[in-house]
Image (tube, rainbow, N blue to C red):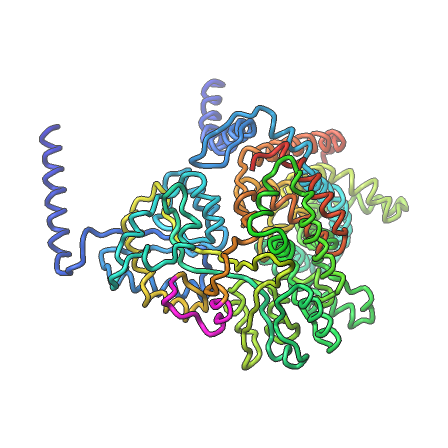
Amino acid sequence: MIRAQNRLVAAFIAPALFIYLVFFVVPTIGTVVLSLFNWSGPGTPLHYTGLANYRGIVHDPVYHKSFQNTMITLIVLGAVVFTLSFLLALALYKLPGRRLLRAVIFFPNVVPPVALSVVWVFLLTPEFGLVNHALHAVGLGALAKPWLSPSLVFPSILAAMAWVQTGFFTILLLSGIERIPDSYFEAAELEGASEFQRFRYVTLPMMWDVFSIAVVIWIIAAIKTFDFIYVLAGVGGDPPPNVWTLAVHMFIVSFSGRTPIYTVGYGSAIAVTMILIVLVSVTIARRVLRREALYY
Amino acid sequence: MKLSRSLAAATASLMLVAACSSSSSHPKAGSAQTLTWWSMWNKGEPQQVALQQVANDFMAAYPNIKVNITWGGRDILTKVRSSLLSKNPPDLVDKDADEMGAAIINTGQALPLDDVLNTTIYGETGTVGQAIPKAYLDQFNVSGHQYLIPSEVITAGFWYNQKLFDQAGVSAPTTWDGFLSLIQTLKSKGIVPLASDNENFFNIYYFTYLAERILGNGVLDKIAGDKSGAGWDNPGVLKAAQAVQQLVAAKPFESQYDGSKWPAAEDDWARGKSAMLMLGSWAPSETSKFASPGFAYRMFNFPTVSNATNGVEAYLVGYSIPKSAKNPDAAKKFIAFALSKKELQGTVTTAQTMVPRTDVAPPPALADAAALLKSGAPLTRLNDGLLYDYPGWWATVLLPLDDDLFYGKITADQFVAKLKQQSISYWKTHTS
């Protein structure tokens, strides 16, 4: 009986496992192997170079900058997105008509990032951008800046990404809050708990599993950040290296945007470091966020 | 088994005979073919409209060949390279020549097109090789073999608004000092001298042009490839960087130019908000819908700095055929067709561009640019060839440092010192 059940389970798992192996595991192994070679792509010879690509990464200032930008996205933007998402989720939880508001907040996630990026270009352009116009209109013209200039473009991109990502994580966290029975909040209120205390001792612990999953999703999304950077900073060509994330760096040096670099081996080494960063970050996050499961 | 094979062969033969007899009513028809063409142009761009017309005319002339076009945009070579891996490439690709060179010619993935040079152009008596100037063909003649046939010629220079020049009482300068003096005059008349669109590959025009003018044609390219970094000590490099610093210090650009997003500044230039625009000869085509009524497109070559020869940039767009293309003959026929005077004239009119045949008149907006190319001055490569020869170094070392210089974050001395140090470091760990 058990053997038959196992066979049934195996039959159900096999197709997914096969697809996972062929489309995820095998390419990952291929990427690790390619990272040990100097290769310019199809039709060119493969030259084994051992760990030379990794040594190159250690000394590459552009990689250092890409890594720094990726970490800023992961940690700084992550903190902003989760703070805003919690605040919005808590506010929405109590509001009447929250279904409509939820749809509005989630809206940026259903629009392709490329289209959103173009909208942000129009918002941030110095001459006719809405942001600078609005600042001038309310008497804050001194704060109007060239938001897409080399020194401000990366913070501007982060602001745009915060706007997009907050909606998604608000909905995710809200789903965790909504399943907490009202009786817990009522009991806390009767005990005289403040708003913050209710959040700290009721809401957060009881939705911890949703929060920890949201953090893992964020880590993976942040390390893969690509489209917003590529479009917002590179309308006329490739974005400048000072705004590259690891994903953008890997793409440009491997496949070329407008610049025919084609160092596929080096790009593979960058991809391998991205995999390692995801693994390390997720492991740390899971350990830090590990709590005993609460059932209610 | 043998019987079934014989039956299959007989059936196939019958089908072939039927196919031939049904299409033999047209004198030019042969077996039906599909020419798969991946183009760098996007749907709606003037070049796309022009080339679609060429394809339509080609299909009318060769009814047995259906042209299947993918308007893939500027990243088309990324897709082409992926298709090479899957052994399913297009039969024809068009793209900027330098990028094509790096993507498929240098990697041995392009088909030699020597026979196309000897092919008679459709409807004419001369061959492709006779119609296209040798100077253009030679740019992509590798080891005696032709790998790219040019379809468009681009040059670059300062586009200027004649009306604003007249208003300020100035004329096109020929020397760098004259150019700086012109900037001051325009500023004194309340006119913004230069448009700039905050794109690193437009910003780099200034340094590479100045270096080419000071050092001579191809010298900067040699210095970039010198892995010891010694070439960066050449005083001409510092002089070129100092000239960029001098230009930036003169504040010739529109306010907040460092935050502009292409094509805002060039559109503003066409609207008459600035006097000059350093750009390729696609400027009229790209800006015409914003140009004020009666706007006359005028252009002058990048000024001379020393007494070095003042070259003229010739940058090509052209056709190549991947080595593993399934229908190379159809692609070759198309090239010989598209280079006919009639088709090129149509492209010139629709797309406002210059073509590599000297017997096809340029559009009026490109008269100055065409005159420069015909002036007999030595032809130079885009950015002295740096993008093509050292793309990784170009993107990760030169462009970021040049942006720092162009936006006034570092001095010319710091620029050269960093360029030397970072180039040495780059070549220790990179091969291209």
Q: Nearer the viewer, residue B146 or A194?
A: B146
Q: Per the image, is B365 magenta?
A: yes
Q: Which residues are magenta?
A: B357-371
Image quadrant containing the N terminus of chain B: top left
Q: Is residue B47 found left or right of A147 in the rendered image?
A: left
Looking at the image, residue A88 lies above or below residue A128: above
User: What's the residue at 15%, 60% (across, down)?
Assistant: B27
Q: Let me know if residue A252 appears in the view.
A: no
Residue B39: give x, y in percent of width and height.
42, 55
* Quadrant position of residue B255: bottom right
Q: Where is B350 relative to B237, above or below?
A: below
Q: Residue at x 36, y 58 (%)?
A: B132
Q: Could you say where residue B208 lies in the image, as x and y percent from the top left?
A: 61, 53
Depicted B249 relative to depicted A174: above or below: below
Report how many numbered discs are placed on residues in the image.
0
Q: Quadrant of the C terminus of chain B?
A: top right
Instruction: Tell me: B42 left or right of A139.
Output: left
State whether residue B146 appears in this view.
yes
Seen from the viewer's position, the closer of residues B279 and A72 is B279
Q: Where residue A79 appears, x then y in whole percent?
A: 77, 45
Residue B376: image location, x then y, percent: 47, 62
Residue A260 left/right relative to A214: left
